[in-house]
Image (spheres, grey):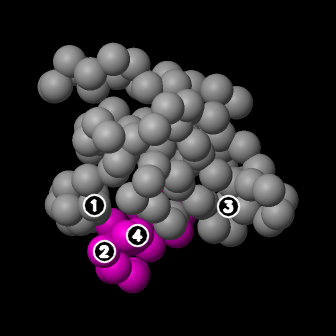
């Protein structure tokens, strides 16, 4: 699946990303089509606003739980969704993160 989001707040260009099984075929992952850097501080705030949970917080990645799905958020842009097959919710999470919380490299 390939989706695209636009950040209307900052007028960023649309960000295409792919969503599918990761290399190990154990989990799903979302990857932006271009190099990005995710603002992890903004993700922390987003998780609180969306009434989610921060499970692990490090300088290079976060493990969060949003909308019932545990997600690894890498600072370099990849999202890994653990133990879920709910494509609609995974896409919702990816769009939320990619549309609002990106920093250009």
Tell me what residue is drawn at x 53 percent, y 52 percent: 78
Residue where numbered disc 2 is placed? 59
- Quickly name the residue at label 1: 40
Query: Where is 13 relative to 43, above or below?
Result: above
Which tag is nearer the camera, tag 3 or tag 4? 4
Magenta part of the chain? 52-70
Disc with the residue nearer the chain's start (3 vs 1): 1
**Cβ–Cβ below 8 Å for labels 3 and 1?**
no
The label shown at residue 61 is 4
In primary-sequence order, the first of circles 3 and 4 is 4
Q: In terms of secondary structure, where does tag 4 sit?
A: strand
Where residue 41 appears, as percent x and y from the top left, is 20, 62
Q: Which circle's residue, 1 or 4, is located before the other in the chain?
A: 1
Mark 3 vs mark 2, foreground winner is: 2
Quadrant of residue 1 within the rendered picture: top right
**Residue lying at 44% horizontally and 53% vertically, measured from the top left:** 76
Q: Select label 3 or label 1 by which is in front.
A: 1
Label 3, label 4: how many angstroms apart (C-alpha)? Answer: 20 Å
Q: Position of residue 103 (x, y in %)?
A: 26, 41
Q: Residues within 10 Å of mark 2 (few under 14, many from 20)?
A: few
Whether tag 1 and tag 4 are in contact, CB under 8 A, the answer is: yes
């Amino acid at each position: 699946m390939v989706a695209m989001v636009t950040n209307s707040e900052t007028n960023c260009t649309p960000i295409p990303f792919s969503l599918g099984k990761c290399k190990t075929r154990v989990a799903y992952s979302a990857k932006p089509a271009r190099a990005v850097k995710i603002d992890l501080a903004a993700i922390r705030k987003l998780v609180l606003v969306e009434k989610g949970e921060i499970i692990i917080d490090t300088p290079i990645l976060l493990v969060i739980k949003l909308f019932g799905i545990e997600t690894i958020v890498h600072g370099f842009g990849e999202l890994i969704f653990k133990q879920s097959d709910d494509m609609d919710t995974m896409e919702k999470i990816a769009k939320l993160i990619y549309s609002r919380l990106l920093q250009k490299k």
